[in-house]
Image (spheres, rainbow, N blue to C red):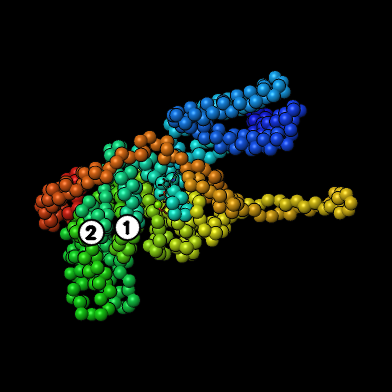
Amino acid sequence: MNEVTKQEMFLFFKKYLFLVISFLFVIGINTNIHWAVYLPISILFAALYKRLTDGYLRDLALRWERSNHHIYTFLYTVSFMGLGLYVFIFYFQLSVGFIVSLLSLFFCWGYFIYFFLKAHQRSAEHQEILEESPGVFMGHYLDKDGLPKARHVSNSDRVQHQITVGGSGFGKTFSTFMPQIYQDIQEGDNFIVIINMKSDMDFENKVYSWCKKFNRKFRYFSITKPELSSYYNPFLFGSRGMIRDKFMLFSSWDNAFYKKLVKTDLAKKLDGLYDEGVTISKMKQLFEEYEGDKDFKGVIADLEGVQYAPFYEKINDPFGSIHDFYKEKSVFFLSLDEDQMREYAKDFQCMIYNDLRGFAGYIRDRVDERDRTPTWIYSDEIKEVFDNSMTTYNSRSRAAGFGNFYATQSPSGDIPRDLLNQLQGSCKTWHILGGLDADSIEYINKQIGTEEIVKYTEQVELGVQTTNTGLGSARDAHKHVISHNTFRRLKLGEGVLYTKEEGFSKKIIYDAMFYLDDSEPRNYTNDFYDLGIKDSIEAEKQKYVKESIKKLTKPDDGLTEQERFYRDDFVPQVTITEEGSMPF
Ligand SMILES: Nc1ncnc2c1ncn2[C@@H]1O[C@H](COP(=O)(O)OP(=O)(O)OP(=O)(O)O)[C@@H](O)[C@H]1O
Ligand SMILES: [Mg+2]
């Protein structure tokens, strides 16, 4: 028997088995029990059987495939076998005959054994897929046999960005971000940035525990927990022009004339600052001469505002640039809690994305493709920060090889529509989870688009007996690739994974987290304060400062100012230690 006919037979059985079972029950009417009792029982049993074969066995197959044999697998097996036995005894007692009882046993057990063998075979296949590593593993979809098949997203798709949409609590972070972060950390040799707009202890601890497990450098910056944060100066990296841009973008400018004035002035004044390393306090000093001028009040207030921030001390030193973290290939976790400190979170978000944008440009422009470190940037909850310049960053950072991942609760509400169009336009992979509002579903469906189908209509003649006239029409029609109802019915842990261009969209079960062994971290609540950061930060800072003070004198490298400006490293000398990375 060839593969197709076997598969077809299987599908046939799967579809009609419950009918066969009900039929067997109806045969029981021949016995002396009234049919009115039998009929509802047989329908109930048929429904139960269908439900079991759809959900129960699939779950069993999944567990088997994961090689996750624990007590549930055992219980499932025993109870399903028991069900078959029950049917057997039931008929036997009613003395309908051996044939009927054997048939029922055959169907129940036979179906189970088929599933069992198939799942076992898949388990081996799955192992092979994992070993080949075709990107990151996200979960499973069901093939046409109704059996689970692994779904990966390749790294070449991942550098073309991703967006996750889903209602609150439907697993944006857990189902779509965490599995990828885990696998990226495990992969090593990359730079990972996670920007979390919530102070989510569980998420932080998980990432920290994975870093520990796979021996990765964990860098943590929190606006609400500065005592645990490492140093990070978002204005430090870049040429004078880049730094000037970052300051210009940080403030809003009503008066075009003053904007021009400041731009020119900054360019001049940054010359003096550049080699020492730019800090916010030094920048503020530059503006002091405009103190009395009302048009400069805005920018001075912006800089002053940050100066009183609780995390100010951690961003105002001339070291800890994004380039340092890139070079040391760390996992950089930023926690910007919008709920506790909304304004600071927004300010900081603005700083970090401006820094990342400039940095992406630098990598694209000056670092050879072969020398680049794979960079994955996870942005959990995107909101106001996405102005026009951010969306161009999104499409351009592809050229730097940065993969960006975004999550949003309500694409129709959180972000202005035209910006969203641009953003989604440049994201190749979408994860669409449950809990979306009707507007968002409508919007997403429009984005994914429709496929052409041919609709046939037949002409009928109405009469006592309706007859087909043999006439009809065929016309082109459009149907949504994924129906509204599919989106509406998504449960927790389910979603549609859609890849643009390939048009590969399937409902998938996001169960990757359960595969990734030891992904449940131990209780780090106490351990958290022993991240290896808190105590060592001050000591290492002292050591670092001592070393860098030696270098504070202008570098004696024989370069002219102009040459130094274009030197490869692009970072003020003061930020580089002997090893080329910061020790804390
Ligand atoms: N695939 C899954 N399987 C089982 N449970 C899941 C799955 N995905 C998420 N959950 C559960 O749902 C909880 C909420 O998920 P998560 O925090 O990722 O939601 P979210 O969409 O990021 O919500 P928010 O908008 O509040 O950030 C998780 O803590 C987890 O327990
Ligand atoms: Mg979340």
| Mark 1 surroundings: few (<14), some (14-19) or many (≥20) residues within 10 A | many
Image position of 474 (left or right of 135)? right
Camera-nearest residue between 258 and 101: 101
Q: Which amino acid does label 1 sit on?
A: Asp
Quarter of the image with the N terminus is top right
- Say which residue appears at 26% left-offset and 48% top-offset: 219
Name the outermost residue toward the top: 98
The front one of 78 and 150 is 78
Task: Examine the rendered structure and indicate whether residue 523 appears above or below residue 455.
Answer: above
Q: Is residue 334 visible?
A: yes
Asked if residue 241 can be seen in this view, the reply is no
The residue carrying pointer 2 sits among few (fewer than 14), some (14 to 19) or many (20 or more) residues within 10 Å by Cα, namely many
Q: Which residue lies furthest to the right in this view?
A: 464
Q: Residue 533 at x, y = what percent? A: 21, 47
Look at the picture and state if 286 lies above or below 352: below
Place residue 272 in its image quadrant. bottom left
Label 2 near label 1: C-beta < 8 Å? no
Left/right of residue 472 with respect to residue 92 in the rendered view: right
Residue at 32% x, 73% y: name it: 253
| Residue at which label 2 appears | 311
- Reading the image, the residue beneath label 1 is 337
What residue is drawn where x is 33% and y is 43%?
206
From mark 1 to mark 2, how far is it between C-alphas?
12 Å
* Amino acid type shown at disc 2: Phe
What x and y, as percent, mark residue 139? 47, 40
Local secondary structure at mark 1: loop
Tell me: 479 left or right of 124: right
Between residues 35 and 377, which one lies in front from this camera angle? 35
Q: Residue 496, image x and y in percent?
A: 52, 47
